[in-house]
Amino acid sequence: MAVEPSFAATVRTGSALLGNAETNLQVPTTTSTIITAGASGTKIEEIVLEATTTSLVPVTVAGLVYVFLHDGTTYHLYDTLVVTAVTASSSAVPFRYSKTYTNLWMPTSWSVRCSQSIAGNASILKCTIFGGDF
């Protein structure tokens, strides 16, 4: 047993736009790889979803974002995040959602992949993950 606690040695961040709507939660086909675990494993601390477009006023449609853990062969649905309908403007901020995790540890070479449920949110929702490698 280690005498000293283990802390992340390298800060990790990954980010990607989510694409077309997902239609299968057992064998998904439209996932975006957000982050892949490092050689000694990775702890995921936070997932942030935000609406982003080139127009500065993104509009989101209510839907879901699916968070999968991928072991290199199989997808494991880990979490489902809610997207609310927001019409951004010069006085209303775009959609943003943040979720923290205290126990999301990924073994070497596993990855976090995300997809979303609404075609209207394709290339609008950006998923960013913050964590650390050991």
Image: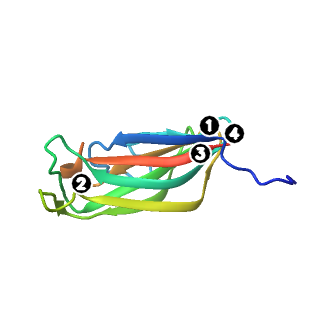
Observer-nearest residue: 32 or 96?
Answer: 96
Question: What residue is pinned by disc 4?
Answer: 40
The amino acid type found where label 1 is placed reads: Gly
In percent of width and height, residue 32 lies at 39, 40
Residue located farthest toward the front when viewing the structure as drawn: 91
Q: Earlier in the sequence, mark 3 or mark 4?
A: 4
Q: Earlier in the sequence, mark 2 or mark 1?
A: 1
The amino acid type found where label 4 is placed reads: Ser
The amino acid type found where label 3 is placed reads: Gly
Is residue 30 visible in this depiction of the protein?
no
Structural crowding at the residue carrying mark 3, measured as other residues with C-alpha within 10 Å and reported as few (<14), some (14–19) or many (≥20) = some
Image quadrant containing the C terminus: top right
**Does the CB distance between marks 3 and 4 fall below 8 Å?**
no
State which mark lies toward you, 1 or 3. 3
Residue at position x 66%, y 35% in the image: 39
State which mark lies toward you, 2 or 1. 1
Question: How far apart, in angstroms, are the residues tagged by discs 3 and 4?
Answer: 10 Å
**Does the CB distance between marks 4 and 2 fall below 8 Å?**
no
Q: Earlier in the sequence, mark 3 or mark 2?
A: 2
Callout 3 secondary element: strand
In percent of width and height, residue 4 lies at 82, 53
State which mark lies toward you, 3 or 2. 3
Question: What residue is pinned by disc 1?
Answer: 38
Q: Earlier in the sequence, mark 1 or mark 3?
A: 1
**Does the CB distance between marks 4 and 1 fall below 8 Å?**
yes
Question: What residue is pinned by disc 2?
Answer: 118
